[in-house]
Image (tube, grey):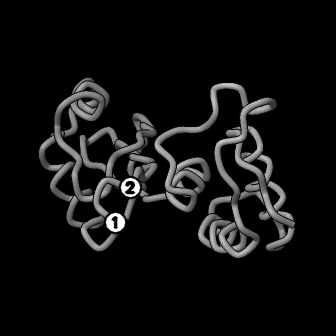
Amino acid sequence: MATKKVSAVIKLQCPAGAATPAPPIGPALGPHGVSAPKFVQEFNDRTKSMEKGLVIPVVITVYQDKSYTFILKTPPAAVLIKKACKLDKGSGNPLRDKVAKLSAKDLEEIAKTKMPDINANDIEAAKKIIAGTARSMGVEVEQ
């Protein structure tokens, strides 16, 4: 079988199980000839077991014959930290205003969740990366 030629790689962040063909999905896929409603249907089917509304990054590879494949990534670290600390958003001034505390147990959970997509060799390195993200959001990390 001959390999198909890739015409575009599109990266989006969509809510799990609740994506719609409305912006940003429709306008991102339309110019490449991909049916937004068809993609949304497949995406929602693949994410229906996840927590509804959790932001899931997705990488869509579009081929020249207008077919496509997509890979789901783990949710962004900031989204997982906000969920663990029950926050709506991070601090506007993270150096001065601390908005929450992230327990060592939660830090490890998030690091384990992110392990497939994070650029770290072991769980300790992953925890340091997640802790850095937490600090930049104004979340203190317990040691």
Quadrant containing the C terminus is bottom right
Residue at position x 42%, y 53% in the image: 56
Q: Residue at x 46, y 43 (%)?
A: 88
Displayed quadrant of residue 36: top left
| Neighbours of disc 1 within 10 Å: few (<14), some (14-19), many (20+) | few
**On screen, 67 above or below 91?**
below
Residue 85, x across and y down, in percent: 57, 57
In the image, 96 versus 84, the foreground residue is 96
Q: Which mark is residue 51?
A: 1
Relative placement, left or right, of 117 versus 50 is: right
Say what amino acid the circle numbered 2 marks.
Leu
Q: Quadrant of residue 70?
A: bottom left
Image height of 49 relative to 18, above or below: below
Drawn side of residue 79 relative to residue 92, left or right: left
Q: Position of residue 27 (x, y in %)?
A: 25, 25
Q: Are marks 1 and 2 in contact (CB under 8 Å)?
A: yes
Apparent side of residue 46 relative to residue 93 in the rendered image (left or right): left
Between 60 and 129, the one lying in front of the other is 129
Badge 2 density bin: few <14, some 14–19, many ≥20, Cα 10 Å: some
**Residue picked out by circle 2:** 54
Q: Secondary structure at mark 2?
A: loop
The residue lying furthest to the left in this view is: 37
Looking at numbered disc 1 in the image, what kind of residue is underneath it? Glu
The residue depicted at 42 percent of the width and 50 percent of the height is: 58
State the mark number for residue 80: none
Residue 95 screen position, x and y as percent: 81, 31
Residue at left 29%, top 73%?
49
Q: Nearer the viewer, residue 54 or 94?
A: 94
